[in-house]
Image (cartoon, grey):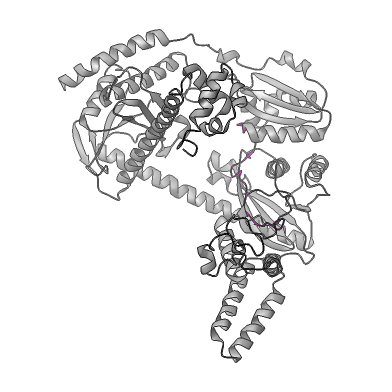
Amino acid sequence: MFQIFLACEPPIKSMWHYYNKKIEKIKYFDYDNNMYDRNNLKNIPKKPGIYIMHNHAGDIIYVGKAKNLFNRVHSYFQNPKKLPIKTQIQVSHVESIETIVVDTEMEALILECNLIKEHRPRYNIMLKDDKSYPYIKITTQEKYPKILMTRNHQRDGGRYFGPFTSSTAVKQTIEALQRVYPLRRCNRKVAKGIKRGRPCIYYHMGQCLAPCSGKIDPEQYAINVQNDIDILSGKNKPIVDQLTAEMIRASENLEYEKAADCRDKIQAIDFVVSKQKIVSENQQNQDYIAFYRENAQNKADQLDEIDQNIACVQVFNVRDGKLLGRNRIMVDGVKDEADEAIMTNVVKQYYNGSHFLPKEIILSCPLDDEMASIEAWLTAQRGSRVRITVPQKGKKDHFIQMVEKNAKLTLEQYFIEKRQKEKRRENRVESLQTLLDIDDAPKRIEAYDISNISGTNNVGGMVVFEQGKPQPKAYRRFKIKTVEGQNDYASMQEMLFRRIEHGMKELKEGKTPGESSFLPFPEIFMIDGGKTHVDAAQSILSMYPELDSVVCGLVKDDHHQLRGVIYRDQEYQLTYGTPVCTFLNEISEEVHRFAITYHRQLRKKNMLSSRLETIPGIGKKRRKALMRYFNTLDNIKEASRDELMKVNGMNQKAADAVYQYFRKPGEKND
């Protein structure tokens, strides 16, 4: 142990020297006076536009739209007792307000949606599941169309069906259609009567007609395309009747293989259409939207603050009169918000940049006073009239009630699953507490790992688990700066030293955990390594007696599998499959993944740098200029001499050298 600390002493001294040189002046904030100056309110314009609220760090915390910016912004700075709790907290963090004036309310609406989507402000109601959904596309704009899954709905002449909520269901539907009326799967050029090599394996499996090899006429191929479109459109009865007649006729003629083939096709068609529930006989495109949340009227006293802040939105997609799918969206930040405000935010965010807009949107509750402007906005996006309705009776009202019931059931299931996950996390943390025999269950655990190859690109990774749950926003990467060669012990010491120094500096500045990158300090520093790694880390913690943290080591066997935990010079064996073993193995795998990913990024960057600098006339400055201009090595490879000459600092000789280097034999496709 004495030799280890001696070996680690020089890096520690060099770290002190490093930090004495690198410490910069810190900008201090007076948090008692860190409020928006109300004298600035008189400068707010009385015009339509958007307002952007910033906190003391300059981060955007809220984006809003108003017909009259002056009146809307002033409403935030009235008597605090008249404001909801959420709004009071929001206003307390505002240090500056930025306004953007536009000509119309429509422009303000579009700008607000785009800024919320880009910045995701903390105090805006946010859709948690903001993603695109899959469609089935038939490329009817091509001579030999294909059928495929896509998430981009474009006006390119193709036929789109959907959206669907499950990519698995889309893939299964496509496979079923390929068994009935197969379309081509490859990207080869096709032409009638021209053979371009051998057909692929799908042809021999009976799942492709090989138009690329000229084995089918365009007229016959078009019949398959139209049949697939009819099936997806729900016009399957004539096709099924025809197949049924062929199956009976083949059976009577003792052609049992042909009859079985017809039977399989009928079953495949039934699989495709079985999920399509008829909702409307007029074959309209509609979206039904309803949400459910727990509040004071329905057992909110049994829920915590976070649960009351979440609502579940259900969007049922009706296409051509058939229910083709539903989307479940969790919405955050709904506590103290009116139903109308929640529905308005849901509609704006859900359809902002949407690839497909239905003709009619049916809601479970009305929007706020923005109904007309939102209808106009959606109409402009679609290119034809979009109607928003709130039914009071009839079939639409009955159906929207069913959607709301689904939202309630989904939210209840969400809470049940959430409680189960929380209980499992609690059990894992408590089992670690029992294993190490410590007084309290650790609220925060930080794990560290070193990654390098023979001492090159030496980096470290820090991952954070709070209440047994990973916190990716708290992860930190370290490029080792004071250790030369491969010395994992000294590298671990430098990483821990720098992490603690950052935390101590922020502590002296009076920062709170919510404002800090390195606070609070963990109850457990978990090191990926054995006893010597733990001893090296412990020598750093001994320099900070005010820290009440302990050090553990994750020990692995010869197969790089987690074997046990080193704590207080004792190894605690782990039993595979137990909660504590599963928990520690998750921590070990996560910190290893995080560290090695950073190492690979640096190694790839350095390999690229060294390769460019081997070209005559290309040094460090020109290499950086080339990468800034072209972004990737592939772009540099494809660049012409004239394009290379446009790069700052390049001359004709250097441009010729780069151009010729990537056109040597063996380099073109490298």
Res 124 visible = no
Task: Tell me where residue 182 appears, x and y as whole percent.
Answer: 61, 67
Res 615 visible = yes
Magenta stretch holds residue 621 = no
Magenta stretch holds residue 126 = yes
Which quadrant of the figure has residue 469? top left
* Residue located at (80% from left, 20% from top): 45
Identify the image quadrant of the N terminus.
top left
**Location of residue 447 with respect to 435 vertically, above or below:** above
Task: Tell me where residue 46 appears, x and y as whole percent.
Answer: 83, 23
**Location of residue 585 with respect to 529 vertically, above or below:** below
Looking at the image, which is closer to me, 575 or 443? 575
Q: On the picture, is 141 further left or further right than 528?
A: right
**Location of residue 225 with respect to 108 vertically, above or below:** below
**Location of residue 203 with respect to 479 vertically, above or below:** below
Q: Give the range drawn in magenta.
A: 120-142
Task: Tell me where residue 518 appears, x and y as whole percent.
Answer: 43, 23
Which quadrant of the figure has residue 332? top right
Which quadrant of the figure has residue 88? top right
